[in-house]
Amino acid sequence: MRTLARPRHHRMIAGVCAGVAERFGLSAGTVRVIFLVSCLLPGPQILIYPALWLLLPQEP
């Protein structure tokens, strides 16, 4: 199983959704849609993305 890292390919902004998609074997588009829909719900989702951007390592 792959580790959670931001890939250098298939990125749109920072690669967070693409990294999560690769880690769990999903398509990047699916993860992006799930993230956008989740932003309509109350909660800290909008703060999690920048936190993951800073915390996830860049793929070598």
Image (cartoon, helix red, strand yellow):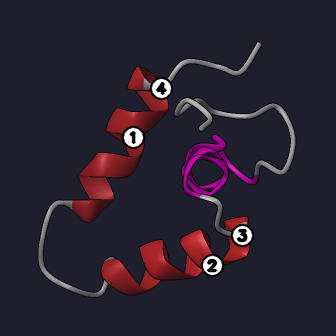
How far separated are the C-alphas under marks 1 and 3? 21 Å
Residue, disc 3? 27
Q: Secondary structure at mark 1?
A: helix
Residue, disc 4? 56
Residue, disc 2? 30
Above or below, 46 against 13 in this view is below
The segment highlighted magenta reads 12-24
How far separated are the C-alphas under marks 4 and 1? 10 Å
Q: Position of residue 35 (x, y in %)?
A: 44, 72
Q: Nearer the viewer, residue 21 or 50?
A: 21
Comparing labels 1 and 3, the label whose residue is closer to the camera: 3
Residue beneath the point at 58% across and 29% down: 5
59 sits left or right of 39 in the view: right
Above or below, 10 against 41 in this view is above
How far separated are the C-alphas under marks 2 and 4? 20 Å
Q: Nearer the viewer, residue 14 or 57?
A: 57
Q: Residue furthest left?
A: 43
Disc 1 crowd rating (10 Å Cα; few below 14, some 14-19, many 20+) is few
